[in-house]
């Protein structure tokens, strides 16, 4: 998702307040969910680098997951994805991710492809992502289908902030069953012209006799200069 450009490089204190309130609410949700039923609590951190080339948007994510009661890290991953706009409101995404699961001594290769229709309703943005991926090196290397419905709305001064909620259902196509569900709610803020931060709470329900996981996550996104802009700046 692209942000609107900021006219100033620094964010006013008033613009930060909605994000601070959101963090407080998310912490309350995590605390209530964790202490109510001895459920797992995890922290997911993500650093994204984005760039554009012609009409293609590139993303290089760096991810890490830790658990409050288990040896860490639980997972570390990176890779690259590319978003290509199609006719109408469709976006085609292709990519490859590489994940390490240290506690299970696993190296997982994950090629993926996704198709996402996106719509706007007044100030709201609606997106329905349909993603297929293969987890090579994890178990019997299953193929999974992930369907995520996202609702996003900007708010605040010059719409530098946004709030979002989404729900994702994941199916194991190889085994022919439901794998997990991820419900997420959060907020984000454009810190500078090229840097944004999202903070969210995620509730993860897994198949089998696995306890519900409560996740507090952050995603810091750094937008690199487009290739043409870098060339022009070097001339």
Image (cartoon, rainbow, N blue to C red):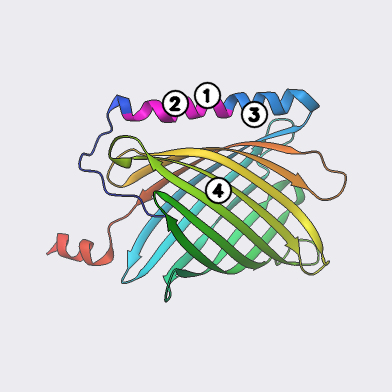
| Occupied quadrant, residue 69 | top right
Mark 3 Cα within 10 Å, few/some/many (few <14, many 20+)?
Answer: many
Q: Is residue 167 or residue 108 the one in the foreground?
A: 167
In percent of the image, x 72 and y 27: which residue is there?
34
The N terminus, quarter of image? bottom left
- Looking at the image, residue 40 sits to the left or right of residue 125; the answer is right
- Looking at the image, residue 19 sits to the left or right of residue 72; the answer is left
The reply to whether the magenta stretch includes residue 17 is yes
- Residue farthest toward the left in the current orientation of the protein: 235
- Per the image, label 2 sits on a secondary structure element best described as helix
- Per the image, label 4 sits on a secondary structure element best described as strand
Q: Which mark is residue 63?
A: 4
Q: Which mark is residue 20?
A: 2
Q: Earlier in the sequence, mark 4 or mark 1?
A: 1
Magenta residues: mostly which secondary structure? helix
- Per the image, label 3 sits on a secondary structure element best described as helix
Q: Residues under labels 3 and 1: Cα distance? A: 10 Å
- Looking at the image, residue 128 sits to the left or right of residue 136; the answer is left
The reply to whether the magenta stretch includes residue 94 is no
**Mark 3 highlights which residue?**
30
């Amino acid at each position: 998702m692209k942000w609107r450009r900021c006219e100033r490089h620094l964010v006013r204190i008033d613009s930060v307040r909605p994000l601070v309130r959101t963090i407080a609410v998310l912490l309350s949700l995590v605390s209530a969910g964790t202490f109510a039923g001895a459920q797992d609590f995890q922290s997911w951190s993500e650093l994204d680098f984005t760039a554009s080339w012609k009409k293609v948007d590139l993303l290089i994510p760096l991810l890490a997951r830790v658990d409050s009661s288990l040896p860490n890290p639980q997972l570390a991953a990176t890779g690259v994805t590319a978003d290509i706009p199609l006719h109408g409101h469709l976006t085609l995404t292709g990519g490859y991710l590489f994940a390490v699961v240290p506690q299970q001594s696993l190296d997982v290769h994950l090629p993926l492809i996704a198709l996402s229709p996106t719509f706007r309703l007044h100030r709201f943005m609606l997106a329905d992502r349909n993603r297929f991926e293969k987890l090579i090196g994890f178990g019997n290397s299953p193929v999974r289908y992930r369907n995520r419905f996202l609702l996003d709305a900007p708010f605040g001064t010059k719409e530098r902030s946004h709030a979002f909620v989404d729900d994702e259902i994941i199916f194991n196509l190889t085994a022919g069953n439901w794998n997990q569900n991820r419900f997420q709610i959060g907020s984000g803020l454009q810190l500078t012209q090229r840097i944004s931060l999202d903070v969210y709470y995620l509730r993860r329900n897994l198949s089998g006799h696995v306890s519900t996981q409560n996740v507090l996550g952050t995603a810091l996104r750094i937008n690199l200069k487009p290739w043409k802009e870098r060339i022009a700046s070097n001339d």
